[in-house]
Amino acid sequence: MKFSSIWAIVKRFWLPIILIPAIALTVTACNPARFKTAAAQVPQLVTAVLSEPSTFNYALNESAYSVFGFLYDSLINENPVTTQLEPGLAESWEVAEDGQRIVITLRDGIKWSDGKPMTVDDVIFTYNEIYLNPKIPTSIKDALRIGDKGTLPKVKKIDERRIEFSIQEPFAPFLRYVGGIPIMPAHALQAAVRTIGSDKNSKFLSTWGTGTDPTKIVGNGPYVMESYVPSQRVIFKRNPYYWRKDAQGNPQPYIERIVWQIIESTENQLISFRSGQLDDLEVPPEGFSLLKREEKRAKFKIYNGGPDTSTTFIAFNLNKAKNAQGKPLVDPIKSRWFNKKEFRQAIAYALDRETMKTNSFRGLGELQNSFVYVKSPYFLPPEKGLRVYNYEPEKSKKLLLDAGFKYNAQNQLLDADGNRVRFTLLTNSERKVRGDMASQIKRDLARIGIQVDLQVLSFNSYLEKLKVTQNWDCYLGGFAGGGVEPHSASNIWRIAGASHAFNLGPQPGDPPLIGWEVSDWEKEIDSLYIKGAQEVDENKRKEIYYQYQRIASEQLPFIHLVERLNLQAVRDRFQGIRYTALGGPFWNLYELRVTD
């Protein structure tokens, strides 16, 4: 679940061979030059994403490829250069001495993109009727649950400008989370939330899908949607009611138009950028050396933010449950393999990550060993107990033999009952590097007698298989970076989390799961995540998150691979870029100018 270069602003709110003529047709069909007519000569940014949005409803979104960073602002923003919190829709805030009560004061005169006033009542509605509503399946709840009981904040109106957020026990990232979530419009959505359909679910669950007229989506961010053509593009225009103004009183943003091209291949995106059709590009490993030679001539700059904040891994489906029809999500024979810690460790030792870094990433990556960002103060170094799995195929084979597996005369791996060890590796098609990695994983595991079949799907189909049907063996994927705060991954590591992908439990509104089980180590990590959020002493917090990483690196629900360097190419005509790996080139989009 990776992201494009524009994802820095979006994330504020997670291969078959193609013939050359087919590529040319795809690029021509989406050529942004056709928008640059005399009537459209306004400051604009043309960017690209690898997949179309899955919804226009922020609360229900599970995809990295979303429109919400353009459509919404939050009460409080994190500056990715300083990592300090700054006012957004809120002009100020006060935190009680014990940290369990926050009073936020809204700016005066804020409006929604349809011109209606944004008020304290919208904040109350957003929290109490959407994010904290037990009948609405939103992952926002996962990040806001506190303590063993999973209690949620209480939100109440003080007066026409102030809102009080309160909790019953300490919660270290409290301000960062309640202030950083988009506020949604009560006047546009309250009726849908309160209307119950024939399926006994809130009508809100089917509101603002991608079939909705995009001009009807109401936000409070710098842009509004002007049009959406599925599988082709989303066009945004400046929100005339956006609250930001510069020191001279001029409205921001200065860039009037965003053309968001949907180009579902990193190779095609590279072609589009080189032909001048895109203004920025997340530089793929295979394109770096070529682009570097063109940097000055073609008038763009490649920024290097060091190791990306994301994670890339393979994970096995550890879910032992059956679906509502009584069919196991995972073949019980395979499930027994996947749920052996020694099997997962053997897989890790069998993967030649250095070769993967050299070949798939052209050397432009770093070996990854933890879910926590390597530059975070909470990252556990190997010398303090993080287990690292270097390439040791003989050690891999010994682990398998000690765990009861065996080899036949053809050096094929069998389990104790004589079943051939064979499984399917699922990944998405949009990134060439993913296909390269998957092919190497197949080769590496063949060397220890395991047959891997590859299944490559488009991103949204891939996501549906992981989150909805859950009928997968192993997947190659990633999560968008959460920055330096480990609690940002709580929806992944908490047992009830909506992104607890390796053993996803029953979710609100979904069909029931029969016989879902949780392991002791999952419970221990869940407990550590509770304690880590409750602890306000930084040194104690570090030790809590260190312990979680020790367990995770032992149990390996995620087998970490290689993460790319954060390389972004941006045209020289954009003025005011303050690049950082945490924010990318466009985190301050509202103050950027186009110089030609």
Image: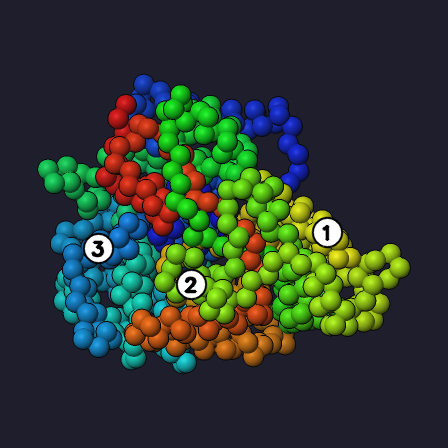
Task: Please name the amino acid that badge 2 sits on.
Answer: Phe
- In the displayed structure, does residue 361 sit left or right of residue 444? left
Mark 1, other Cα within 10 Å: few <14 / some 14–19 / many ≥20:
some
Task: Please name the amino acid that badge 1 sits on.
Answer: Asp
- In the displayed structure, does residue 480 sit left or right of residue 162? right
Q: Earlier in the sequence, mark 1 or mark 2?
A: 2
Q: Is residue 119 visible?
A: yes
Q: Name the outermost residue toward the top.
A: 38
Q: Is residue 458 visible?
A: no
Q: Which mark is residue 86?
A: 3
Quarter of the image that includes the C terminus: top left
Q: What is the total number of numbered labels drawn onto the structure image? A: 3
In this view, 539 is above or below 87: below
Q: Between marks 1 and 2, how big is the CA–CA gap?
A: 34 Å
- In the displayed structure, does residue 504 sit left or right of residue 217? right
Residue at 51% across, 77% down: 523
* Residue 141 image position (x, y, % from top left): 39, 67
Q: Which residue lies under the disc numbered 2?
A: 379
Residue at 74% across, 72% down: 402
In this view, 266 is above or below 110: above
Q: Which residue lies under the disc numbered 1?
A: 453
* Residue 512 image position (x, y, % from top left): 58, 71
Q: Between marks 2 and 3, how big is the CA–CA gap?
A: 25 Å
Task: Please name the amino acid that badge 3 sits on.
Answer: Glu
Q: State the residue in front, 269 or 515.
A: 269
Q: State the residue in front, 186 or 563.
A: 563
Q: Earlier in the sequence, mark 2 or mark 3?
A: 3
